[in-house]
Amino acid sequence: EVQLVESGGGLVKPGGSLRLSCAASGFTFSSYSMNWVRQAPGKGLEWVSSISSSSSYIYYADSVKGRFTISRDNAKNSLYLQMNSLRAEDTAVYYCARGRELFDYWGQGTLVTVSS
Amino acid sequence: QSALTQPPSVSGSPGQSVTISCTGTSSDVGSYNRVSWYQQPPGTAPKLMIYEVSNRPSGVPDRFSGSKSGNTASLTISGLQAEDEADYYCSLYTSSSTVVFGGGTKLTVL
């Protein structure tokens, strides 16, 4: 069974940093592109970043470019999102999702709250 | 990044059919078939319902169907059931290898 489990969320002050993790199991992690998608409270989905299976191709939404860094460790079946210079508008549930053109499996999400 | 426009809400009675639209431009939706649809019941993670405009993943009921005409993709749910009440999002994989989501549509089953 495919499972994606996010962790690392929490309360952080504006300007602070946080690192999210996504532990994958039940499939060959190294064969798939992975993504981070976020959802602000009461709002819609926003794609954040994607990384190809071998980390050769990385893409970011304009809203996080220069502040967030996506990475993966295929030996550990894990996906990461390093978030720096956090702003109030980054407050959201962050989901990891499998796929490139479509997202066929999603984790349950981890909540990041940016507030003083 | 392009924007996809969805109606904020739609509604229907059990057994009826509803259609949710997702409008882009001739440069995105109109040019590519990389449109997906996701269902998100309250408090849960999104679930893939349709990919590549009209394909259903295994396990998705055939009451759910997708289509495209010009710059507008559509999700149709026939034989509406109470369990279909959720938010629905379209998405597009762009020519820049990024992904854009529509604003979402809240489906209410009356």
Image (cartoon, coloured by chain):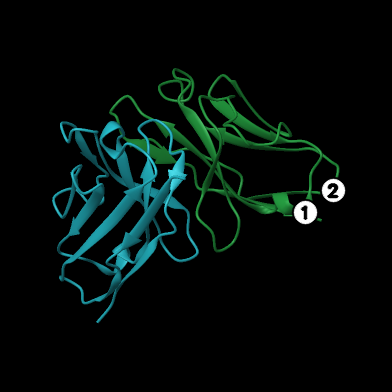
Chain colours: A cyan, B green
Task: Say the numbered circle drawn on residue B65.
Answer: none
Q: Residues within 10 Å of mark 2 (few under 14, many from 20)?
A: some
User: Do the CB atoms of the residues marked 2 and 1 lie less than 8 Å apart?
Assistant: yes
Image quarter hosting the C terminus of chain B = bottom right
Say what secondary structure mark 1 lies in.
helix
Q: Is residue B54 above or below residue A68?
A: above
Q: Is residue A11 left or right of residue B102?
A: left
Q: Can residue B80 be seen by looking at this rendering?
A: yes
Looking at the picture, tell me which residue is in the foreground, B1 or A13. A13
Say what secondary structure mark 2 lies in.
loop
Q: Is residue A71 left or right of residue B22?
A: left
The percent position of residue A38, horizontal first and vertical second, equals 37, 55
Q: CA distance from mark 2 to mark 1?
A: 7 Å
* Quadrant position of residue A21: bottom left
The percent position of residue B39, horizontal first and vertical second, equals 58, 46
Subunit that carries the residue with mark 2: B
The percent position of residue A106, horizontal first and vertical second, equals 44, 48
Looking at the picture, tell me which residue is in the foreground, A91 or B44. B44
